[in-house]
Image: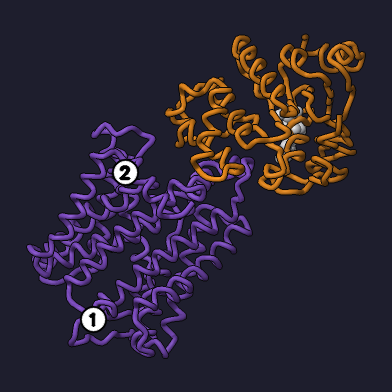
Amino acid sequence: MSVLLDVRGVTKRFRGLTAVDTVSLSVEEGEIFAVIGPNGAGKTTLFNMIAGVMPPDAGTIAFAGERSDGVAPHELCRRGLARTFQIVRPFPELTVMENATIGAMMRAPDMEAARARAGEVLRQLDLWDRREAKAKSLTLPDRKRLECARALATGPRLLLLDEVMAGLRPTEVDRIVAILREINRSGVTILLIEHVMRATMALAGRIHVLHHGATIAEGSPEEVTRHPKVLESYLGAEAL
Amino acid sequence: MNPLASLSHLAAEAPRRALLLLGLMVAVLAVAPVVLDRYLLSVFFLIFWFATVGQAWNVMMGFCGQLSLGHALYVGLGGYIGALLWVKFGISPAIAILPAMAVAMAFGAAIGWLGFRFGIEGVYFALLTIAFAEVTRIGFDNWSFVGGAAGFFIPVSPVASPVNLRGGPVLFYYVALAMMVVAFVVCALLRRSKLGHAWLAVREDAEAARALGIDVFRAKMAAVVVSSAMTAVAGVVYAFYQNNLFPSQTFDIARSIEMILAPIIGGLGTLFGPILGAFILTPLGQVLIALVEKIAGRAIPGVNLVFYGAALMVIIWYAPNGVWPWLKKKLGIPEGRE
Ligand SMILES: Nc1ncnc2c1ncn2[C@@H]1O[C@H](COP(=O)(O)OP(=O)(O)O)[C@@H](O)[C@H]1O
Ligand SMILES: [Mg+2]
């Protein structure tokens, strides 16, 4: 297996605060990789740097073998990196179908093809029945899945998911876990940031744990849950 | 996709009844001059004209979410270029619309580049558009070659010549009607194209649009350029209709405001909104001007703007998204389509 995403010694500071502190990780093609950590650990900041929203202060990021830090988000999307937003950002006045179609446009030769692709993705994410509804009228679980649908519609190699399960009820979590497995099986590598431990353990092959911006552990779910530092600083506090 | 194919798609997609109704309305408008007098022809000219520029402005604001309060700039540029080329060099306005569009696009691109490159957004961007219109007005005020503040005049020609936009109210009626129909079709095609969807995405949430591979800067630039080009064509026609151009009127912010009312009242971001808005506002405004003239014994400038303001408030109170979305609901047309 080859490395799809390679993060090397990345640091980000906000004024005095070091939000991300020399973090390194690499995501292999085809795997589901999770980054976990308590609130304020720097997960979203790390994620934003990977997605091109902000450049790192130090360190480098490479996607698909090419240097990618400092590259604009739309360009990264073209290269095959798609993301969701922790605080969902649907196009509120547009329909679910239009939302997904806009995601599919980039790789589609014309709008006809984009709509076809959008239809596929909406079925995959259980949103087909809601396709005519305006995005602003959706419930939170539906919005979270729309967020995934839109990102998936861009035809990514790597899907970055920022807390898509946060705030969902357990049945909704199970539903999205099943969908993400399916997406992964179809060949899409997934990097997910999560707070919901149970789901993360069930999904991810490898887990990277952040605390106060720094890496404290990395390994399989079993290894991570047994790690003393993790137990002390994270799992201990928030109880699994 | 080639435009002809998209056009047939567009026709195939619309419900039969709607197409029939639309065709009927255009047909009625096409034969209407038989019964219209001079005054009514001029009212209809204004309706079509405001529908056209409203459609153009709507591309920027309604589709792409970029507020321009200086669209009189493109009307003025188009008008002056058309008039200049005709009067000084004998070049037909039919040809002059090309340089008129090109110059307006260049100005639009300059404003867009400054605004979008340096992250000037929302009201600040709107201020930038006003500033450009004002600076251009001052420039024309002091440019003696085009008559300066004293104005520039297009001589009335004794012989009608439609391609040179020389003729009576019937000619201008048809020219403006054609312009409105073309603007509508262009916008309908754009609305369903990739570019149109990119605009909507940028309007709704630029950050999310960027994450889906949309080059936000390019999409915004395209909106300004398309909008300014369409407006410039209307500017050429207006100059030949009026036969005179004064910088203080042509580039006036009051003109810019008047241009944006129809699409706001009709329904931002919709295709029928600008047309419907113009059909509601322009006749009412004209009636009001006539009434005031009768009562006060003279024209009071700006009275129609005051009226438009009041109309805007009433309509926003009852139909906050504009008349067309409201009407659509009443007619039972599903939300997702025009
Ligand atoms: N744009 C920003 N400006 C200043 N501080 C920020 C910014 N974004 C995040 N932070 C700070 O950086 C730290 C990490 O935040 P974040 O990456 O959102 O954590 P997480 O996603 O793990 O909850 C927090 O202390 C947060 O307050
Ligand atoms: Mg976060």
Residue at (39% x, 65% y) in the render: B231
**Chain letter, purple:** B
Residue at (34% x, 50% y) in the render: B264
**Label 2 – label 1 distance at C-alpha:** 40 Å
Ligand 1 lies in quarter: top right
The residue pinned by badge 2 equals B322
* Amino acid type assigned to the residue bearing label 1 in the image: Ser
| Mark closest to the chain's N terminus, 2 or 1 | 1
Position of residue A84 relative to residue B125, above or below, is: above
Position of residue A163 relative to residue A236, above or below, is: below
Callout 2 crowding tier (Cα within 10 Å): few <14, some 14–19, many ≥20: many
The residue pinned by badge 1 equals B161
Q: Between label 2 and label 1, give the one nearer the viewer.
A: 1
Element assignment for label 1:
loop
Q: Nearer the viewer, residue B176 or A163?
A: B176
Label 1 is found on which chain of the structure?
B
Residue at (76% x, 39% y) in the render: A50
Q: Is residue B270 visible?
A: no
Q: Nearer the viewer, residue B221 or A55?
A: B221
Q: Position of residue B34 (x, y in %)?
A: 9, 64
Q: Position of residue A30 (x, y in %)?
A: 78, 27
Callout 1 crowding tier (Cα within 10 Å): few <14, some 14–19, many ≥20: few
